[in-house]
Image (tube, coloured by chain):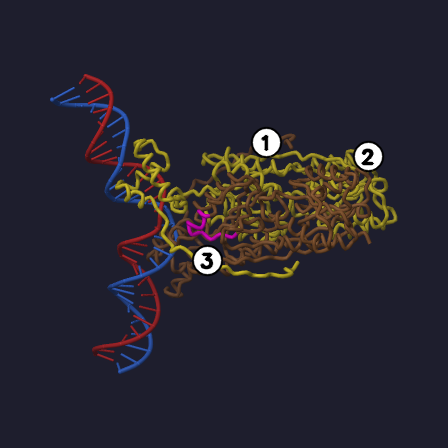
Chain colours: A brown, B yellow, C blue, D red
Amino acid sequence: MAIDCQKIICIFAIMKTPQKRTTIYDIAKKLNIAASSVSRALSNSSKVNPATKALILKTAAEMNYQQNVMASNLRKGSNRTIGVVVPRINQGYFSNIIAGMEDITYNKGYNLIICQSNELHAREVDCVNTLINQHVNCIVISIAAEQGGHEHLKQVIDHRIRLIQFDRVVDELETFKVINDNERASSEAVSHLIEQGYQRIALLEGPQNLDIFRQRKEGYLSALRKHGLPVLEELMCENAWTKELSAEATRKLLSMKNPPDAIFASTSDFSALGVLEVATQLGISVPDQLGICGYSNEPFTEITSPSITTIDQHSFSMGKTIANLYFQEMETTDLHIEPKIMSIKPKLLVRKSTQKL
Amino acid sequence: MAIDCQKIICIFAIMKTPQKRTTIYDIAKKLNIAASSVSRALSNSSKVNPATKALILKTAAEMNYQQNVMASNLRKGSNRTIGVVVPRINQGYFSNIIAGMEDITYNKGYNLIICQSNELHAREVDCVNTLINQHVNCIVISIAAEQGGHEHLKQVIDHRIRLIQFDRVVDELETFKVINDNERASSEAVSHLIEQGYQRIALLEGPQNLDIFRQRKEGYLSALRKHGLPVLEELMCENAWTKELSAEATRKLLSMKNPPDAIFASTSDFSALGVLEVATQLGISVPDQLGICGYSNEPFTEITSPSITTIDQHSFSMGKTIANLYFQEMETTDLHIEPKIMSIKPKLLVRKSTQKL
DNA sequence: AATTTTTTGGCAATCGATTGCCAACTTAAA
DNA sequence: TTTAAGTTGGCAATCGATTGCCAAAAAATT
């Protein structure tokens, strides 16, 4: 993806001579009062005469005063900032989570600092350390796929910074968590497939070091058991969690003597898309000869032909939930916090790719 | 999009008694040296004996020291942070821009603070003010669609904060800008349609208070002129910039006595999708009876049937360009900055929706 | 051995806002 | 008129890291 052409046009500009920012001291000096009064007036304290307060505010506005948050933060020991670490910002699920969080934090006057781990553990550790350094009030994280320890998360707690894990969580760490009930959603999806008459249902798995993918597999297995269907090793494909890997896995599956009649791409809708493309190439009709179910409700699943059955994780409202969790449970109280786990039940969206009937 | 069910599980946890963070003074006291030496050692200054330095670093690590960036920032007057204001985070184009920026800023040890204006002017002003308060080093902005003044952007400059506008820019403000050559891209797209044999090409316009949409219209007009085609008012639809509005406009267009044989959805691929859906509903075959061209190269355009011709804006690399611009031109020098405009030429991606031949 | 130069590291001011404490002043009550 | 209660606002310490300036110590030079 190269840049075809970059024409650069220069425009001369006259820059103003850099004047210093106005501080509360400047305002105090001008009005011949103490800086403390200015500070109190600006923070709307009741300990300052309404008339004086009005005068201060007016002067502050005139002098174009903007609070130096760095100084305030230092003094107050908090910077009203939440750090977010996600594998990738530009992935529908995560950007929705962030958008949802921002919606809440904005109203509370908090800022979000965003970091992406790019699915790499080392980089994730780095991001977390940066955020610790920044003394953020809270770190919200969904861990990278690459396997690694979680010392860095313990560090967060040791530094007395709130920690909320979401989606991909480290189970053994006792922190606040906001997760989806992956097992139940998977189980429902597979049950739905079975009820539609599919008998040989294949599973595309994600990296099993991540809880969410283990849980989705568990849901698959439990649905098969519940309906008395055999668990067939040959129908379960490891690490098929990109579109390309899924396409490859699908080709293998469909060339079996006894191929599956449905594929549950438990990893993502991108995988499901890979399946659909291969099926289309091979002239296999979906949903009649092959049922396909994805995961995440990416926008495109609605517009493929046929549209793809998938699982909506309520990502935007999940982001809101995370932010609200911080404000309700963690902003003020600082002792005896009992980590809560909030499990949100995703919703199965039945579309054409699995409607045989 | 409601949450179906939320089960909340409480887990009791024993919290450590909150000990204070270690500061350079703690380290200094422990080693019986001055805090200034600790500071110098930690910033790897040459003015401290290598042996002492090593000792200090070792002790710092042992004491689990993490720099208090707030204090450092206050003293240094810079916080190595770039603020980003976009209409929406969870929109492919913008999240890619942010991802691209983060890629660069991460390596430079800078942080990104993200705000979304939700296309509202008042909220944008608010975001900008917050960022000014935060004393960010630079503000990167793509303005909201809602019409409004740009005093807030002047404020940014008045506060001596770097300002980079991208994509949707206020032309008359002399700041650094990173834009796409919308006019040229549009012109190319329309020329392509004409070359494919389409004669009556309709235009779906975005809000004309935004430069980018005016430019795209300009490109449309110039292509028509260049090929000697008449400009027909009835084929230009104002404010058709969501999927729904486009669908509506398309229905009107296609019910004309003399309907268009191609539609250029200059606003976005979502609009193009609206067009495609209506055409499909009406049994109008694409590309034979109707050509469709979108804008932005959203991921889904590749997988619709037929796939949609669109314009790729190199969003990820555009994000990188923005960040690099800051580091190359604005990080150090503070006088005589000549605002540059970088124009990136988008690429027309011809797909099936316009291949008549 | 005496002097100059270079290293090393301490002191204290600084960044700007906040806040506990106390003094001066106003108002109300005795 | 005096005392008590309530307002208003100033002083100065504080948050923690940084850095200019200077002195002590070490090394190099004469």
The verdict on residue B191 being magenta is: no
Q: Would you place residue B179 above or below residue A229 in this image?
A: above
Q: Residues within 10 Å of mark 1 (few under 14, many from 20)?
A: few
Question: Tag 3 or tag 2, which sits nearer the N-term?
Answer: 3
Where in the figure is residue B229, as x and y percent of width and height? 81, 37
SS label for mark 1 = strand
Residue A248 picture quarter: top right
Residue at point 59%, 34% (across, down): B342
Residue at point 26%, 40% (across, down): B33
- Amino acid at circle 3: Ala
Residue for badge 2: B196
Residue for badge 1: A8
Q: Residues within 10 Å of mark 3 (few under 14, many from 20)?
A: few
Which stretch appears magenta?
A: A154-164
Residue at point 50%, 43% (across, down): A149
Q: Nearer the viewer, residue B99 or A201?
A: A201
- Answer with left or right where residue D10 lies relative to residue A321: left
Q: Chain of mark 2?
A: B
Where in the figure is residue A121, as x and y percent of width and height? 53, 40
Residue for badge 3: B13
Residue B275 visible here: no
Where in the figure is residue B37, as x and y percent of width and height? 30, 38
- Amino acid at circle 2: Gln
Q: Could you give the CA–CA distance between mark 3 and mark 1, rounded to whole angstroms?
A: 58 Å
SS label for mark 2 = loop
